[in-house]
Image (cartoon, helix red, strand yellow):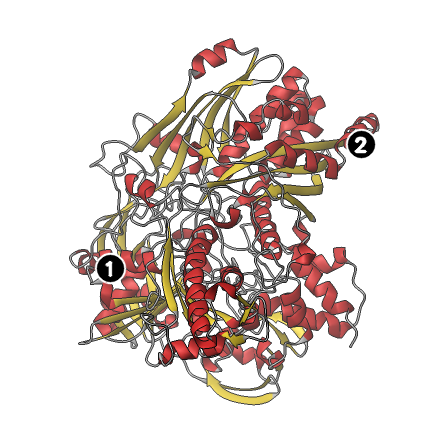
Amino acid sequence: MTDVVSIPETEIAPGRVGGRMERVEDERLVRGLGRYVDDLDPPRVVHVAFARCPYPHARIASIDASQARAIEGVLEVLLPDDVLGRTGPISILRPIPEAPRVMPYALPREIALYEGQPVVSVCATSRAIAEDAVAALDIDYEPLPHLSDVEKALAEDAPILHPELGTNLLVQNPRGDGNPEAGLAESEVVVDDRFRINRVSGLPMETRAILASYVPGVRELEVVASTQAPHLFRKQLSDSLRFPEADIRVTTHDCGGAFGLKLGIFAEDVLVCLHAMDLGRPAKWVEDRMEFFRGATQARESLHVARMGASSDGTILAYTNHYYVDLGAHNSPMGSPMLSSLMFQGPYSFTHGYVERNVVLTNKVPVGAYRGYGQPEGCFVRELLLDRIARKLRIDPLEIRRRNFIRPDQMPWQTPGGAKYDSGDYQRCMEMAAETIGYGEARERQRALRDEGRYLGIGLACYVEMTGYPGSKFLGKHGAEYGAHEGVVVRANRSGGVDVYTGVPPIGQSTETAFTQVAATVIGLDAAKVRVIAGDTQGTPVNTGSFASRTLIAGSGAIERAGREIRDKALRVAAFMLDVPVDGLELADSVISSVDDPEISVSFADVAINAFYGHRLPEGELPGLEATAYYDPISSAFSYGTAAALVEVDPETGEFSLDRFLFVHDCGRQVNPMTVEGQLHGGIAQALGAALFEELVYDGDSGQLINGSMIDYFMPTTADLPKIELDHTEVLSPVTPMGIRGIGESGTIPPGAAVANALCDALAPFEVDINRLPLTAEYVWRLVAESRAHA
Amino acid sequence: MTQTLIDVRLTVNGEPVERAVEPRRSLVDFLRHDLGLTGTHVGCEQGVCGMCTVLLDGEPIKSCIMLAVQADGAEITTIEALNGEELHPAQRAFKEAHGLQCGYCTPAFILTSVALRERGLDIPREELKEELAGVLCRCTGYQNILTAVETYLAADD
C-alpha cells in the first residue's frame, strides 16, 4: 500500500512518463506566439462594452439609449427586454445539492443584484466607441437596501434578495458521522472560534475574453474563448442562446491563466454571441481589469463556526464546523465550493464529526470555483484549532499530529464527511518536513532568541486533498451537467508519429506536455513524434476539461487505452509486413523490431503509411491507425502533504518575515517532476498571496468594492515571496491509471494555515489566537495589543 | 466620438513605421492591433501588472500607460524582435527552467531580462527580485522565473 517508488529521476528519459521533459507549449509561448483571444483580429471585427450597475442592489427604473445609439460607429445596443425574451438562464454545471437553482439571465429583468452586473450591452466598430456609447446611456437606478455579508443576510429583518426563495439562506447541507456532541462532552479540552476567510480573486493575468463569429444562413456560431472547458462552454452557450449545440464550435487556442475562474460561461459571453448573430460580424469582448474585479467570479469568502475537542493526550475526539459561504448574488456555473465539507477531516483519524455548509446570498459578485475549491478554507480552520489544543495541552504541534494521523494500515479510510481515502503515508510527509526545516534546532533557537526579546515561530499544516472525481455516475447522482471522464482520439500520421486530439485546452498546466509523455511512453514513440491538438470542440471527443485536479488522471487513462490499441494494431500490421509472429515484436523509439533479431524491423511511419493505404494488411484488419478511447475514473485519488513555515515577528509593529517555507507532498506517480514542481510553486504563491496580502474589501455602508484595481489589490510580486522548498514521496494510488494523484491545486491548501500557526507559535507568550485571513501586520499588531490590554 | 488623427513616426524592431493614430490610442493597442505584434499582452491598462512591457530606447516601459503619439521618434523593441527558428538565449533559459506556465507574462519578463543584461551588472537574487517586480505572474510563484533570469544573465556570450 505504501510502496515508495525509488527510481532515480535521472534514469528516466525526459520524454517518458516520469521524465523532466521541457514543455512543448513553450516553443510558441516564449516567442509571444501563443494565440490568446485578443490576439485575433478577424476582418470586420466589432467590439462590445457593457454598462454595469454601480450599486450593490438597485431597481433599474428606466434606460434611455437614444444618445448612445446616435453615436457614429455604434451598431447595436441591447437592453434587458431585448435579451430576456430570446435567451434562457445561464445553466449551472455543478448544482449545490438540494439547493434551488438561482440562475441569472444575461441581463437582469428589473433588479440588479451586485455592483458590476451588466445591465446594457453595446456593440460598436471600436472598443473606444462602445465605451463612449456606454457613457452616453442614461440609466435611472433606484438603489435598494443591500446585504454586504452573511450575518446581515441572515438577520431577521434582512431584505430577501430573491423573493421566490423566501430566504437568503440558499441551502444548508449537513454531513457527519458518530456523535460529535458526546465526543465534545467527553473531551478534556474544547476549543472553538469564528474564523473569517477572506474574499479573494483567482486573478489570471489574461482577463475573460471571447470572440464570436456567426455565418448567417449557414447558421454556424464559431467561438474562441478563454476557458478551461470548451466542451462545457459550448453546452452552456447552447442552453442559454437556445441554439443547437451542433452548430456551435468553441476553441481555446491559449488561455492566459484560469484557476477555476474560467469554468463555464458568463453573462457577457451570451451577449457577445447575440451581437455577433444579430450583426453577422465577428464580435469581440476582452474584459478590462476594472470590469474583472466587479464581474468575474470571486472566491473563498466564508465564516466558519467551529469546535474541536480532544482528550488529555491530544487525541481529537470530535470536530464540528458550521460554515457560511458568502455566495454573492446568485449561482455561478461552479459555485459554491464544495470541498470544505467533504475534506473537513483532513489527515486525522477522529470518528465524531459534523460539518454543515450554509450557502448565503448577498449583494456581491458571485463566488465561483478557485483552485482548492473549499479545501484551503477547511484546512485553515482545522489546523489552527488543532494547534490551539496543542498549546492548551502543552503538547508540541508535531507530536499532537503524530498522535492523530490516519495510518497507512487503516486505508482505505472512510471519513465522516463522505470521502474514501485511497492510500498514503501522511505522517511520513510531516516527518520529512520537520527534518528538512530542522524542527528540533528551530525549537532551541526559538527558546534562545526569546530571551533576547525576539519572537521566532514554527508552523505546520497538514492536508489531504480530493483529486479527480469518483466517476461519472457519482456526478450524475449529484446533478452535475458533465461527466468525470476524458476522451481522446489518437491518430497515427505519415511522419512517423501520432496526433492526440483532446478537448482539454492549454491553460498553463502543461497538459500538452504531460499527454505527450503518456502517449510516447504507452505507444513506444519519441516524444518529439507526438503532437497534441488541444482545446477545440471540433474534432475532439466529448470531454470535461481542465479542473478539479482531474485532467491528468482521466486524460492519461484515455490516452493509455487509445495508445495500447494503436500499439497493438501497429504490431499486428508490422508482423504481417515482416512475415514474423506478432509475439516476438516490440515497438520502441518509433521502430518495430524483433526482440530476437533487431535487424528484422520496420519503422512506425512505414506501418502507419501502409495502414493508411490498406495495401498489405492481415486478413480482416481494417485500414487506418487510430483509436478513440474514454476513461472514467473508478474513485478519487487523495493527494496529501505538509507545509512548514518559519517566521520571526516584531510584536511592536506586527511586521513579520517568512524566513523559510517548505512543502512536502505526495501526488503519486509524477508524470513530469518539473511541471509538478511548477504547479506547486504556483499554487503556493497564490495561497501565500491570499494568506498575507489579498482581500477584496467591500464597504459595509455603500456595499461597493473598495479596492477593485491592480494597484489596490495586492497580488504578490517577485519581491514578496520567500524561497519555496519542495520535497515529496511517491506512493502510487491504487485507484488511478499509473498511480497518479492530482497536483494542480495542492499548493493552495495548507500554506495559510502553516503561516498562521507559525505566528501563533511565535507569539505564544502573548497567547494570541488567529481567526482570520489575511495575516496583515496590522492584524498581528492588534492581536498583540489586545493581548497586552487584557494582561 | 471619432477623433482627429495624428501622424507618428517611430522604429519598431528595427523597421521604420509611419501611421496616423487617434490621440487616445495607447502604445500597446497600437503595437498589437495596428501593427499586429501580439506578443505584447495587456493585463491591467493601469501600469501595474507589466504584461505590456516593451523596450523603449532599450529601457523596459509599460506600453499601456503610454500613448502611441508619445512614442513618436522612439525605438521600440517587442518580443518579436527576438524570434527566429532557434530560441533567443533568454527564451531558452525560460524554457529550460520551466519559467512559464500559461505564457501570458513571459514576453514581458524576457524583455525585462534582455534590458537587464544590457546593463551588464552582476545582480544578486535579492536585488533581482526587486528588478523584476514590475511584471506580475500568477502561475509560477516566480521561483523558476528567477532561476531562468539568473541563468540567462550569467551565461557567456
Helix, strand or loop status at disc 2 = helix
Say the numbered circle drawn on residue A441.
2
Question: Dot 1, crowdedness within 10 Å: few (<14), some or many (≥20)?
Answer: many
Closer to the camera in the image, A618 or A327: A618
Q: In the picture, residue A469 is in which quadrant?
A: top left
Residue type at mark 2 is Glu
Question: Dot 2, crowdedness within 10 Å: few (<14), some or many (≥20)?
Answer: few
Q: Which residue is mark 1?
A: A238
Residue type at mark 1 is Ser
Residue A496 in view: no
Task: Provide residue B108's location: percent of width, then percent of height.
Answer: 60, 68
Helix, strand or loop status at disc 1 = helix
Query: Can you say which quadrant of the picture contains the N terminus of chain B?
Result: bottom left
Closer to the camera in the image, A416 or B138: A416
Cβ–Cβ below 8 Å for labels 2 and 1? no
In this picture, is B133 found above or below A72? above
Task: Provide residue A28's location: percent of width, then percent of height.
Answer: 54, 72
Furthest residue in direction left, as rendered: A85
Real-space Cα separation, disc 2 to disc 1, in angstroms: 61 Å
Q: In the picture, residue A666 is in which quadrant?
A: top right
Relative placement, left or right, of B47 versus B147 is left
Residue B35 in view: yes
